[in-house]
Image (cartoon, helix red, strand yellow):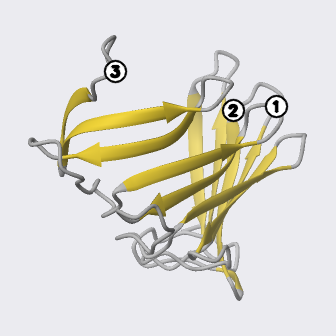
């Protein structure tokens, strides 16, 4: 919002204004979308609102799409949102969920993305999963993506593998 508490003007498909409500720590908690006339509108995922939750150290642990009444809903991606799990080291798991918090695959065929990072915080591995195990969605064409870096932090090699861990 601007200094007068009015919605911040954005030129984004589907809506013209947003209103952001912050939590006590200054993090986005609720984002609401409005049309040119200030009426509730949807974002590109078809949600009227997006709700975020954070853990004690400020990591986003949950994101949910909400309908115009503030209730969780299935959006255009085919899920309600995501739950993020951090292992405290260098791994992050992002789980797509339905409006009740149950694992649910998105339209492109996976429900879980797992990331691994090196000591410098660079992504070195990403893998895709669904409720039944490893998956290689047709829209993405790989199950695992591994990235290597040189001494100056430039990505020098990206390799993609199918669900049998064969190079694609």
Of pointers 1 and 3, the one earlier in the residue sequence: 3
Between 141 and 117, the one lying in front of the other is 117
Residue 7 image point, x, y percent: 28, 29
Checking the image for residue 57, the label placed there is 1
Residue 61 image point, x, y percent: 71, 49
Between 148 and 30, the one lying in front of the other is 30
Between 85 and 113, the one lying in front of the other is 85
Q: Which residue is mark 2?
A: 122
At x 56% / y 77%, what residue is drawn? Answer: 136
User: Looking at this rendering, what residue extends furthest in the bottom direction?
Assistant: 132
Label 1 – label 3 distance at C-alpha? 28 Å
At x 67% / y 27%, what residue is drawn? Answer: 24
- The answer to whether residue 119 is above or below residue 54 is above
Of pointers 2 and 1, the one earlier in the residue sequence: 1
Count of numbered tags? 3
Label 3 – label 2 distance at C-alpha? 38 Å
At x 45% / y 62%, what residue is drawn? Answer: 66
Checking the image for residue 5, the label placed there is 3
Q: Is residue 160 left or right of residue 34?
A: right
């Amino acid at each position: 919002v601007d200094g007068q508490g009015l919605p911040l003007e954005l030129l984004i498909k589907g809506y013209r204004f947003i209103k952001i409500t912050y939590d006590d720590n200054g993090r986005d908690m609720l984002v609401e979308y409005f049309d040119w006339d200030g009426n509730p509108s949807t974002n590109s995922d078809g949600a009227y609102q997006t709700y975020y939750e954070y853990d004690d150290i400020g990591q986003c642990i949950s994101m949910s799409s909400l309908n115009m009444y503030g209730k969780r809903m299935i959006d255009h991606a085919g899920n309600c949102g995501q739950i993020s799990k951090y292992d405290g080291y260098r791994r992050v798991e992002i789980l797509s969920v339905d409006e009740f918090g149950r694992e649910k695959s998105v339209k492109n065929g996976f429900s879980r993305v797992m990331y691994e990072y090196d000591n410098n915080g660079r992504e070195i591995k990403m893998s895709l999963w669904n409720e039944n195990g490893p998956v290689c969605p047709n829209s993405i064409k790989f199950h695992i993506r591994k990235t290597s870096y040189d001494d100056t932090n430039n990505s020098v090699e990206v390799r993609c593998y199918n669900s049998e861990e064969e190079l694609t």
